Image: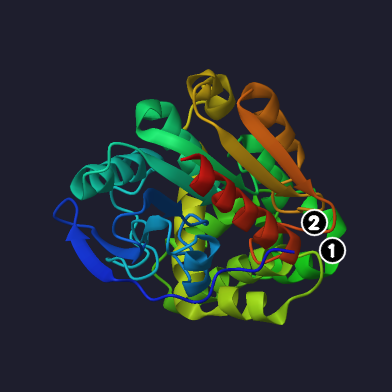
Amino acid sequence: MEALYPLIKPFARHEFNIDGHHSLYVEEVGNPGGIPAVFLHGGPGAGCEDYHRRFFDPDRYRLILFDQRGAGRSSPHADLKDNTTWHLVDDIEWLRRHFGFEQWLVFGGSWGSTLALAYAETHPERVSAMILRGIFLCRPHEIHWFYQEGASRIYPDYWQDFIAPVAPERRHEMLPAYYELLTGNNDLSRMAAARAWSVWEGRCATLSPNPAVVAHFKDPRVAMSMARIESHYFMHDAFLRPNQLLEDAYRLKDIPGVIVHGRYDIICPVENAWELHQAWPGSELSIQPHSGHSAGEPEISAALVRATRFFSDKL
């Protein structure tokens, strides 16, 4: 099984004030003369982690990683102003132009796959290839599955902790109830809601319990940005029209891609990956038989490394 590449530090770090309000934290990693690639983290709101650099051969790739608006080390932290899918698509294109790349490989998992698809369908001529993991198409039934009914039947014990911050009479509409808590003025209620929201996701992210993953999601800074930004996006259907990403998948016809998905992904069921693969003939679907959602699952990590190695030879 392919191992992640050794831990590598960025050769450059930047903070770009993108619009007079949001400042993006950006890293450049690997070979300055290598194949251009961009890493799109999940959430929305999760931010990049050090191990995300390790999917790419540092001798072959020039990798750009950035914390999306309000996430990670970007600022203002957990801010919702001018924070939509299309602002993020514009940010990705701004970064491509800034670094002077004609095209780049786009790598995204979970929400990062959503954003990668939105970007590639908007700017297909700028994408050399895509590697997508844990496909999330942000359709209403996908949100309902994870935040209202579906995943709750698989993890009923974890679900009780998720619903705890919400008054019983509001539990028939969990997303609006959480959004009110996370955008309200009560600091204690907001933090409790952020923690419960984020821990629910962390607990469901791996096939077997992984305390390290849960601890990361429990971190107050991670929890606040992820819970606030996710609820903001999901309350607005991710700023997409119904089924937009599948309907516009024909725009990907000239882009090669690899889709990696865990068979037992509870957050984003494998059906999403199957439907995308059917709509995108140029894609290769790789279902990992003993994995959940997280990029840190051993099978999924290995498949992602194989994909970056494949495209480093091809490109």
Can the viewer see residue 92?
A: yes
- Residue 148 visible to the viewer: no
Indicate left or right for 14 with 84 as reference.
Answer: left
What residue is shown with label 2?
A: 152
Q: Disc 2 and disc 1: Cα gap in Å?
A: 5 Å
Q: Percent x, y for residue 70? A: 35, 61
Counting from the top left corner in percent of width and height, residue 238 is at 48, 40
Classify 71 as above or below 234.
below
- Which residue sits furthest left? 20
282 and 80: which is toward the camera:
282
SS at badge 2: helix
Vertical relation: 190 (above or below) 100: below
Give the amino acid at mark 2: Ser
Q: Where is residue 58, by image quadrant?
A: bottom left
Asked if 231 appears above or below 279 in the picture, the reply is below
Quadrant placement of the N terminus:
bottom right
Q: Which mark is residue 148?
A: none
In this rendering, the count of numbered labels is 2
> 246 and 308: which one is in front?
308
* Percent x, y of residue 196: 62, 71
Q: Position of residue 248 (x, y in %)?
A: 51, 21
Label 1: how many Cα within 10 Å (few below 14, some 14–19, many 20+): few
Assess disc 2: are there few (<14), some (14-19) or many (≥20) residues with their C-alpha within 10 Å of its C-alpha: some
Image-quadrant location for residue 32 = bottom left
Disc 2 vs disc 1: Cβ atoms closer than 8 Å?
Answer: yes
Residue drawn at (13%, 55%) of the image? 20
Residue, disc 1: 156
